Amino acid sequence: MSTTPLSPKQTQAFQAFDEYNSRDTVREEHEGQTYPKELLYAERMTARLNQFAPDATEALQLAARSQHIGRWEIPRNTYPMDRKGYLQWRNQLKSHHAHIAADILAACGYDEKVIEDVKFLLLKKELFHNANTQLLEDVICLVFIEYYLEAFAAEHEDEKVVDILRKTLKKMSGKAIEAAGKIRVSERIGRLIGEAVKE
């Protein structure tokens, strides 16, 4: 199992994505150091993709690295704080990520085919039907479970957490669910995952 070395163009794109995400004013602590939140997220996405699908296409690698690019520029509170507002916010974010990524990739010299492929993935088109879109979603879900689920659960009751876990599991492939089972979680999270899997 090996990860293909990055091409010079891809290295340039990753550096540009990371430079953009370094502007994030939201900070996150990790192993005693503080990072721009979306820069750390991008690195986690790449690491999980390399582990989960080391032979992923270049477009998929680029999409994973830019999955949350510029996310802080559209705060959640700019939309109504209800389910409808949440979905509108998420859809706007997808377009925002795709637009920023496309501009960066064009500046790095990528052709239109690669740019369109990355936008397709970031817009989550044909989820459940397109293998690469599903693969990106799997990695997103695995990163959420490994790094963000505990913090989310700390702020919500069990019922809410189980509901989110059920929705997350429904978006994942069997292979990803198997990989999720190998992630170390707290006793509470393990119990809640067990409840979510029952239905």
Image (tube, helix red, strand yellow):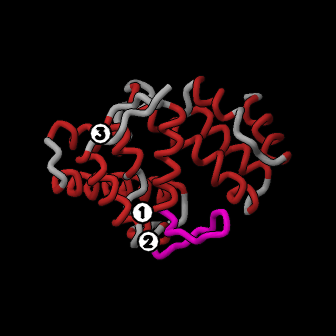
**Residue sitting at 41 percent across and 28 percent down?**
55
Q: Give the CA separation, mark 3 to mark 1.
A: 18 Å
The amino acid pointed to by label 1 is: Arg
As drawn, the label of residue 24 is 2
Q: Residue 23: x percent and y percent?
A: 39, 73
The magenta segment: 25-38
Q: Is residue 34 magenta?
A: yes
**Tag 3 secondary structure:** helix
- Tell me the element at label 2: loop
Mark 3 residue crowding within 10 angstroms, few (<14) / some (14–19) / many (20+) = some
From the viewer's perspective, tell me whether residue 80 is left or right of residue 160: left
Of the pair 133 and 41, the residue shown nearer to us: 41
Give x and y (percent) for residue 155.
73, 63
Nearer-the-camera pick, 18 or 1: 1
Image quarter hosting the C terminus: top right
From the viewer's perspective, is 16 left or right of 160?
Answer: left
- Name which residue lies at 73% across and 44% down: 162
76 within the magenta span = no
Residue at the image point whose x is 50% and y is 25% from the top? 1
Vertical placement of 85 versus 109: above or below? below
Residue annotated with mark 1: 71
Q: In terms of secondary structure, where does tag 1 sit?
A: helix
Whether 169 is drawn above or below 34: the answer is above
Question: How far apart are labels 1 and 2 at the CA level?
Answer: 8 Å
**What mark, if any, has residue 120 been given in the picture?**
3
Identified by mark 2, the residue type is Asp
